[in-house]
Image (tube, rainbow, N blue to C red):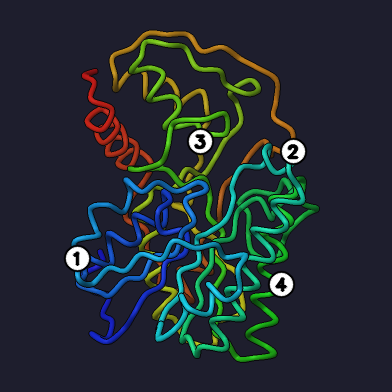
């Protein structure tokens, strides 16, 4: 998939949040392509273990710093060709509990990065947005330009990021590309903590022979998107035309899976027979999600190869090995 993507041997990639789930996978993919990679992370949600394997590479540089510090952002963007901005705090319910912190990290931090990229002459600024910007618009599939009212501070921070991305293209001619991720899953996604994503949480608990709790009735649906599709979207955005800049794009496979079906699929794959618990709906959550990816296909040449079935099996295999347990 990535073999066809060609970058100059002099290109330097800055991955913010590079010790996190998506960021560390991006760093690994770029290093495997023999690219030069700089990682910026303050390890508030990322893990040193995710980047330790890269430290011995002469093409990898680690900066332990915070995107809320503009001077750190300026340093990190020095001599950089492409910025892949993944640094943010995720989780809709946690943002409802901590709106000021989310504003500080996700909005101020992203603005710092955009401004530093502009000042330092970065070629492309690709940043993580979210399907949560669609808010209360329940039309399916979800298409760019048909957003509703956002339902949580996290979603609002991503909406503001997109507006800054639009302005930085129109005012300063910085090529920005917002990627609206839809429920990304795969290797290195942490199963730990109260705000862990459902797929790694399901897998971990089932491996421990514990019954997980499903928020709601399990009949909510999501466009679960395997990590390798997200890597492709980021790298294709780096090669996209300037005419495609200043906009946001759905990044998904374009499928739709019901949560209870996902749970049962994982149970079958792990040979487990445990009934889940059902809890209350989470505040700020939407009921259904399914992406129209035609815009990304057209303007970014995004062509995701990993459907849900292939991705979930790869994820299960990785967790079984990583958690050191047999199914």
* CB atoms of marks 3 and 2 within 8 Å: no
Instruction: Tell me if mark 3 has few (under 14), some (14-19) or many (20+) residues whose alpha carbon lies within 10 angstroms of its own.
Output: some
**Front disc: 3 or 2:** 2
Upstream in sequence: badge 4 or badge 3: 4
Upstream in sequence: badge 4 or badge 1: 1
> Quick one: SS at disc 2?
helix
* CB atoms of marks 4 and 1 within 8 Å: no
The residue under label 2 is: 97
Residue 83: x %, y % from top left: 46, 74
**Front disc: 2 or 1:** 1
C-alpha distance separating marks 2 and 4: 24 Å
Upstream in sequence: badge 2 or badge 1: 1
| Relative vertical location of residue 144 with respect to residue 187 in this rendering, above or below | below
Instruction: Tell me if mark 1 has few (under 14), some (14-19) or many (20+) residues whose alpha carbon lies within 10 angstroms of its own.
Output: few
The residue under label 3 is: 197
C-alpha distance separating marks 2 and 1: 40 Å
> Quick one: SS at disc 3?
loop
Task: Quadrant for residue 245, please give it.
Answer: bottom right
**Front disc: 2 or 4:** 2
Tally of numbered discs = 4
Instruction: Tell me if mark 2 has few (under 14), some (14-19) or many (20+) residues whose alpha carbon lies within 10 angstroms of its own.
Output: few
Residue sitting nearer the eye, 43 or 258: 43
Q: Measuring 51% from the left and 13% from the top, which residue is drawn there?
A: 276
The residue under label 1 is: 57
The residue under label 4 is: 163
């Amino acid at each position: 998939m990535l073999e066809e993507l060609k970058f100059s041997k002099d290109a330097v990639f800055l991955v913010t949040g590079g010790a996190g789930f998506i960021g560390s996978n991006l760093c690994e993919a770029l290093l495997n392509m023999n690219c030069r990679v700089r990682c910026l992370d303050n390890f508030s949600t990322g893990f040193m273990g995710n980047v330790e394997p890269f430290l011995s590479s002469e093409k990898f540089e680690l900066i332990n710093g915070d995107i809320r510090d503009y001077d750190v952002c300026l340093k990190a963007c020095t001599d950089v060709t492409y910025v892949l901005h993944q640094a943010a705090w995720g989780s809709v319910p946690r943002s409802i509990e901590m709106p000021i912190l989310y504003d500080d990290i996700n909005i101020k931090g992203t603005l710092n990065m955009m401004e530093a990229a502009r000042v330092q002459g970065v070629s492309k600024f690709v940043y993580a947005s979210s399907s949560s910007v669609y808010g209360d618009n329940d039309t399916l599939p979800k298409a760019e330009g048909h957003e509703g009212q956002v339902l949580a501070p996290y979603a609002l921070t991503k909406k503001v990021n997109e507006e800054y991305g639009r302005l930085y293209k129109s005012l300063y001619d910085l090529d920005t590309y917002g990627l609206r991720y839809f429920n990304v899953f795969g290797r290195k996604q942490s199963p730990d903590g109260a705000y862990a994503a459902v797929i790694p949480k399901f897998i971990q608990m089932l491996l421990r022979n514990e019954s997980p709790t499903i928020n709601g009735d399990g009949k909510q649906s999501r466009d679960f998107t395997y990590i390798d599709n997200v890597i492709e979207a980021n790298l294709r955005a780096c090669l996209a035309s300037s005419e495609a800049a200043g906009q946001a794009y759905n990044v998904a496979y374009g499928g739709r899976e019901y949560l209870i079906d996902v749970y049962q699929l994982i149970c079958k794959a792990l040979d487990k027979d445990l009934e889940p618990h059902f809890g209350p709906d989470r505040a700020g959550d939407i009921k259904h999600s399914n992406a129209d990816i035609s815009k990304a296909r057209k303007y970014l040449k995004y062509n995701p190869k990993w459907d849900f079935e292939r991705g979930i099996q790869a994820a299960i295999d990785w967790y079984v090995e990583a958690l050191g347990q047999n199914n």
